[in-house]
Structure formats: structure tokens, C-alpha cells
Image (cartoon, helix red, strand yellow):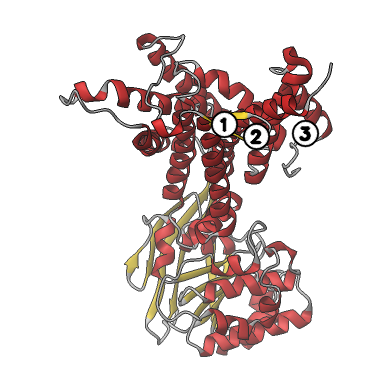
């Protein structure tokens, strides 16, 4: 595997994760450099979501090693991990129905300096400004996705874990999200995308990790994407 | 039977006086159930404990600490009892309840029910079951106020006002402030709230502490009206659970409004047909359960 040139932000070594009795991850190794956009590709159930949840500390049991900016987090309580500068956007979006849009936006505490301010966020997502006093789950699916993204941009998190953000959304919204990820990349965010929509991922990412049966099967840099198409299709079963 | 306006209103006011106790206690239960998913059967016992902190603080704590002239005043008890009982609650949550969250509701209910029996048993062993009077009611709250339609005891009026303030203050904090938004979010999806970097276990302990502190506060308010007895909680809690069932578990405003209304219904029933006044709440509970099983303010899931 070629190591990224940037400073290392995240290193996962020999990560095993379990839900109750089932062993989901069987020794994951991956690294992400500062400012990189990396995807986790693979079939449903391959363990991609579990990798994100392990990083933020939401799996029942995990062992191995996960370092964030050199800090070991494998034994840290979940609420402290976020304070290392991680923003998490779950697959089901996790918009709170008993909170207004603005309360949803302001919920995650600021974990690092340099996050976006509320006016900056409203400038980036004008829809949310318009609907800021509606209850969170009254928004359309696309608006909810924007809200789920926007609320982790406020916290100053520099490493974003985004789980299936394009799932079930109209093409026009997927296009908007693509632009958004591009902008975030320019601003220097480090992003891990779990993505089903390969075309969405292909243009954005620097590198792709292929996850299969709880293991990293391949690492494909952007440059090698064309030559690896056939191999990739086998893994993804498309 | 002739129903005079005066008769009805005076019973309704006395009913409201009971209603504020129902409201404070069911509010505490609702707050606890929302975040912890635990039906806190120890609530009545902790209400009783609050009254005893006030009583013993007034009669016995002075000699015990070598200052025979020291009496914990009523006003001080309103702060001290909730703090003491809240601390007891936090210990209970940290050492016992926190081990049960991964299991069914039922285990929390059984544990708190056991605790209630233990606390009540210990107090029954040492204190008079028929009750001891609490004589620390401040001078300023003696006497009666003319409400126009009746002379109403000043102390009871104070209880109604301060209870309403505490109830609506709690509602405001939960529904309208940043702190409350953590609580609401934690009620919906505690895992995600943790992932955002909020110390959810701490929040849960403090919430339980606050819920039972409310019960203790109600216990102090009740002490000068009813006598302080080891069984005062178990008598109260049965009605309060009926109130909670009618209002819908977990709804903040629902528990307050239902508590107040049912107190008044009880008072009104006393005028119309007195023997039914102690059962009317349970009749309403049966009817509500048949028509709206989730309670008047509960969300059907």
C-alpha cells in the first residue's frame, strides 16, 4: 500500500468489532492523511458502517488500535472521542424530531476552534435558514441530509465521517452534496465517505478502500481507478 | 342537591392543592422515564424521605451534631431536602440503575420497587406509622386569604403558587433552553448525542437526581399539611401513577396539566358525590386506557 503524503490524521490497526456475539470486523487496517477524501466501498453488510461507528465509539465492543492525530482512542468513552475533532453523520441522518431545525443545528458542542459560524452555515444552506423554527423531521429528506451535514460543520471537527449521505435522495440533491464535499475538501476537511453511489464517490475521493467480509480487500488510489474497474466490479457485485 | 358556586369552588381549590402534588410528582416521573426509560417506583419513598429530611432537620439534627439549639428552618429545608435526596438519587443511579439500561424496563421497575419497600420498611421501623406533626411552618404563612368566594389557607395558596412555578420552570428549561435540547435529544437517541461529544452518562445521573429532588421538594411542601409518616409516599404514589397513565408516560406538559386537572376533578367529585372522590381518578384511568392507551398526551408508537 502506498502511504499518503500528508500528515497522518487517522490510523486504524488490526481493528476488530463485535455486536453482541457477532464478530463484524476482522482486523481492519487503514490510514487517512490530513485533507484527504477517502471512501469505503463494498456490499451491504461488508462492515463499512461498523468501521465508522468503531471510530466514533458506537459499537458494543472493539479492540485493536485507532489513533486520531496520534492519540489512542480504543479505550476512550464515546463522548470524549468527538472532542478530538470528529464529526459523525449517521446513515439514518439522526435528525431529532423533538428539536427545531436550529436546535438540531446547535446541538453538537463545539469541539475545536475554527468551525463555521451560524451565519456562515445559513449562507451555505439557505433552506435551513428559512425553516429554522420548524421541527427537525418536518424537513424533506434532502433538507434533513443538509441539516445533518451542517450541524457537524459548526463544531470545528476536522475529520468527518459521512455514512451513505446520498442514499434515497434526488439526483439534483446528490449533485449539491457533491459540490458541498468538494468545497469542504478545498477548506481542508478530512473526509471518510461510506458510499453506495460509486459515481458520486469516484470523482471526489483521493483513495478508495474496498471492504469485504469485515476486512480491507483492496486500496485503490484515484490514479489506479480506471485500471481496477474490473476488480472493483467483482467486489461490489455490480 | 343544590350546588352553590362557593361550595364547588372551594372544593376545586382544595383539589387543585392536591393536584399540584400530583403534578410535581408525575413531572419527576416523566422526566426520569423520558431519559432513563425507567418507571421509578421509588418516587413515593423519596417524596417521604424529603419530608423526613425536613422533619428531622427541625427536631433532631441539632442535638445530634451537638448544637441543641439548631433547627433546620422550613425555608432551608426547601433547599436542603431536595439536595440530600437528589444526592441519594445520584448514588442509586450510579451504583444500581446504570447497570440495568441494557435490559427490559421491567428490571428498573422491580429494582426501584424493591428500594421503595426497603426505604419505607426502615422508616416504619423507627418512626410512627400514623405520622408525626411538622411544626416548622413559618409564621408568615399562617392564617387565611380571602379569595372572594372563600377563605383559603395562606399556606396552601403558597404551595399552589410555588409548585406551579417549579413545574412550569422545569417545563421551560426542558422545552425552551439549550440544556433542555440535550435532554430531549438524549431521550430520542442517546447514542448519537454521545457521538457528538456530550457526556450522556453524567446527564442521566443528574436527570435522575433532579427528578427525585422534585419529589423531595413536594415532600417538604406536604409536611405542614399532612403529617409526616413512613407510608405517606406509598399512599400518594398510587394516585400519581394513575395520573401518569392518564397523561401519557414521558410527556412533560402532559404530566403537569393532567396532575392539576385530576386534582380538581377529585375536588369537584367531593361536592357531587363524596364517596367517589377517591376512586374517580381510577375510573378516568380505565376509560382513558380503553380509548387512548398511550394516554391523553402520549404519542402512539
Which chain's residue wears label 1?
Answer: B
In the visual, does A143 lie left or right of B99?
A: right
Foreground residue, A1 or A208? A208
The residue singled out by tag 3 in the image is B293
- The residue to which callout 1 is attached is B21
Discs 2, 1 touching: Cβ within 8 Å: yes
Which of the 4 image quadrants contains residue A180?
bottom right
Mark 2 lies on residue: B259
Q: Position of residue A179 (x, y in %)?
A: 65, 87
Q: Mark 3 or mark 1, which is nearer to you? A: 1
Give the CA distance from mark 3 to mark 1: 24 Å
Please indicate whether residue A208 sits to the left or right of residue A56 in the image: right
Farthest-out residue, left: B66
State the CA–CA distance, disc 3 to disc 2.
Answer: 18 Å
User: Which quadrant does the N terminus of chain B fall into?
Assistant: top right
Residues marked 2 and 1, same chain: yes
Chain letter of mark 2 equals: B
Amino acid at each position: 500500500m502506498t502511504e499518503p503524503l500528508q500528515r497522518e490524521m487517522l490510523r486504524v490497526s488490526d481493528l476488530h468489532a463485535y455486536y453482541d456475539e457477532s464478530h463484524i470486523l476482522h482486523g481492519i487496517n487503514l490510514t487517512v492523511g490530513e485533507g484527504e477524501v477517502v471512501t469505503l466501498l463494498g456490499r451491504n453488510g461488508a462492515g463499512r458502517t461498523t468501521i465508522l461507528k468503531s471510530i466514533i465509539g458506537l459499537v458494543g465492543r472493539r479492540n485493536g488500535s485507532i489513533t486520531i492525530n496520534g492519540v489512542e482512542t480504543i479505550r476512550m468513552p464515546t463522548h470524549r472521542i468527538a472532542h478530538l475533532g470528529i464529526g459523525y453523520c449517521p446513515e439514518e441522518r439522526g435528525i431529532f424530531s423533538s428539536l427545531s431545525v436550529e436546535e438540531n443545528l446547535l446541538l453538537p458542542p463545539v469541539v475545536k476552534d475554527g468551525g463555521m459560524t451560524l451565519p456562515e452555515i445559513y449562507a451555505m444552506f439557505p433552506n435551513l435558514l428559512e425553516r429554522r423554527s420548524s421541527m427537525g423531521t418536518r424537513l424533506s429528506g434532502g433538507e434533513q441530509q443538509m441539516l445533518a451535514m451542517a450541524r457537524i460543520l459548526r463544531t470545528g471537527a476536522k475529520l468527518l465521517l459521512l455514512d451513505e449521505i446520498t442514499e434515497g435522495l434526488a439526483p439534483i440533491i446528490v449533485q449539491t452534496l457533491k459540490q458541498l464535499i468538494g468545497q469542504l475538501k478545498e477548506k481542508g476537511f478530512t473526509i471518510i465517505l461510506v458510499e453506495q453511489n460509486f459515481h458520486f464517490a469516484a470523482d471526489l475521493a483521493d483513495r478508495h478502500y474496498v471492504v469485504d467480509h469485515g476486512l480491507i480487500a483492496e486500496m485503490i488510489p484515484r490514479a489506479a481507478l480506471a485500471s481496477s474497474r474490473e476488480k472493483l466490479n467483482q467486489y461490489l457485485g455490480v | 342537591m343544590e350546588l352553590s358556586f362557593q361550595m364547588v369552588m372551594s372544593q376545586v381549590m382544595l383539589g387543585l392543592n392536591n393536584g399540584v402534588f400530583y403534578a410535581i410528582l408525575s413531572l419527576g416521573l416523566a422526566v426520569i422515564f423520558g431519559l432513563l426509560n425507567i418507571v421509578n417506583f421509588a418516587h413515593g419513598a423519596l417524596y417521604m424521605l424529603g419530608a423526613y429530611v425536613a422533619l428531622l432537620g427541625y427536631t433532631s439534627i441539632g442535638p445530634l451534631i451537638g448544637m441543641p439549639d439548631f433547627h433546620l428552618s422550613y425555608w432551608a429545608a426547601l433547599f436542603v431536602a431536595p439536595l440530600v435526596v437528589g444526592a441519594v438519587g445520584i448514588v442509586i443511579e450510579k451504583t444500581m440503575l446504570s447497570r440495568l439500561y441494557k435490559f427490559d424496563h421491567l428490571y428498573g421497575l422491580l429494582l426501584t420497587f424493591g428500594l421503595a419497600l426497603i426505604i419505607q420498611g426502615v422508616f416504619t421501623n423507627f418512626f410512627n406509622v400514623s405520622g408525626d406533626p411538622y411544626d416548622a411552618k413559618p409564621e408568615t404563612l399562617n392564617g387565611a386569604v380571602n379569595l372572594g368566594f372563600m377563605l383559603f389557607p395562606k399556606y396552601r395558596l403558597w404551595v399552589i403558587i410555588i409548585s406551579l412555578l417549579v413545574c412550569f420552570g422545569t417545563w421551560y428549561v426542558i422545552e425552551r433552553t439549550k440544556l433542555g435540547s440535550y435532554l430531549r435529544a438524549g431521550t430520542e437517541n442517546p447514542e448519537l448525542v454521545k457521538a457528538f461529544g456530550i457526556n450522556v452518562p453524567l446527564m442521566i445521573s443528574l436527570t435522575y437526581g433532579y427528578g427525585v429532588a422534585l419529589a423531595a421538594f413536594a415532600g417538604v411542601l406536604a409536611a405542614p399539611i399532612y403529617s409526616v409518616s413512613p407510608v405517606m409516599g406509598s399512599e400518594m404514589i398510587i394516585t400519581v401513577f394513575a395520573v401518569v397513565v392518564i397523561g401519557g408516560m414521558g410527556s412533560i406538559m402532559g404530566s403537569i396539566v393532567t396532575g392539576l386537572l385530576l386534582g380538581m376533578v377529585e375536588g369537584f367529585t367531593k361536592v357531587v358525590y363524596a364517596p367517589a372522590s377517591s376512586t374517580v381518578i381510577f375510573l378516568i384511568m380505565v376509560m382513558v386506557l380503553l380509548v387512548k392507551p398511550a394516554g391523553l398526551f402520549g404519542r402512539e408508537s
